[in-house]
Image (cartoon, helix red, strand yellow):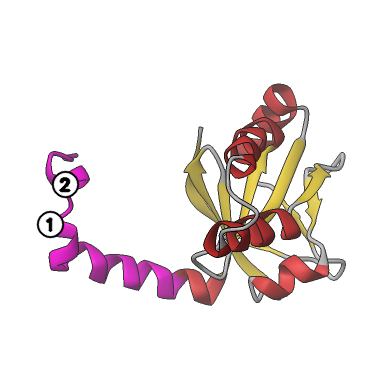
Amino acid sequence: MFRGASAINLDAKGRIAIPKRYRERLHVDFNSQLVITVDFDAACLLIYPLEAWKAIEAKLLLLSDTQGPERAMKRLLLGYAHECELDSNGRLLLPPPLRQYANLDKHAMLVGQLNKFELWDEAAWQQQIELSRETIQSDAFANSERLADFSL
């Protein structure tokens, strides 16, 4: 499972170095095979181990090619999906269209989300954190059935 937020940098070639604490697990458990795609709800990237991505693809396969919203979801997630492998130094090359989608330039945040990572522009991540705080304090959060019994 992936957790925690790490400040990272993109190099001049558009590569990111995955923090060391994740590298061994990615190499041993997932043979360093990853899929990067876009988040359909935010200007960030999603990085899945290939095995976890295959489960997403199975769900996408069940969506319609004739229903507009379902087709749009497939088009976005699959159209941007990029299969890649960590290099020997634990780096990932982010293709230009993916960097552009997430407005990634130099400073970024890699955020563990249990089965995947989110990759954010650092400033956008700070804005997202503030938005998340506001959401937690809103009535929508208080009225969520799924969160009613959630406690820490």
Q: Residue at x 60, y 50 (%)?
A: 64
Instruction: Give the residue number, with chain letter if any, for mark 2.
Output: 145
Residue type of the residue flagged with mark 2: Glu
Report the number of numbered marks. Answer: 2
Q: Quadrant for residue 127, please give it.
A: bottom left
Instruction: Give the residue number, with chain letter if any, for mark 1.
Output: 143
Taking depth in this image into account, of 98 and 126 the one nearest to the observer is: 98
Q: In the figure, 81 relative to 9: above or below?
A: above
Counting from the top left corner in percent of width and height, residue 9 is at: 69, 64
Crowd band around label 1 with a 10 angstrom C-alpha radius: few (<14), some (14–19), many (20+): few
**Mark 1: secondary structure:** loop
**Residue 104 seen in this snapshot:** no
Q: Quadrant for residue 99, please give it.
A: bottom right
Counting from the top left corner in percent of width and height, residue 85 is at: 82, 41
Counting from the top left corner in percent of width and height, residue 41 is at: 49, 65
Taking depth in this image into account, of 53 and 64 the one nearest to the observer is: 64
In the rendered structure, are the residues bearing label 2 and label 1 in contact, judged by CB atoms less than 8 Å apart?
yes
Q: Disc 2 to disc 1, how far (Cα)?
A: 6 Å
Magenta range: 126-152
What secondary structure prevails in the magenta region?
helix
Residue type of the residue flagged with mark 1: Asn
Q: Which residue is drawn at 56% across and 43% down?
A: 116
Q: In the figure, 127 relative to 91: above or below?
A: below
Q: Is residue 62 left or right of residue 104?
A: left
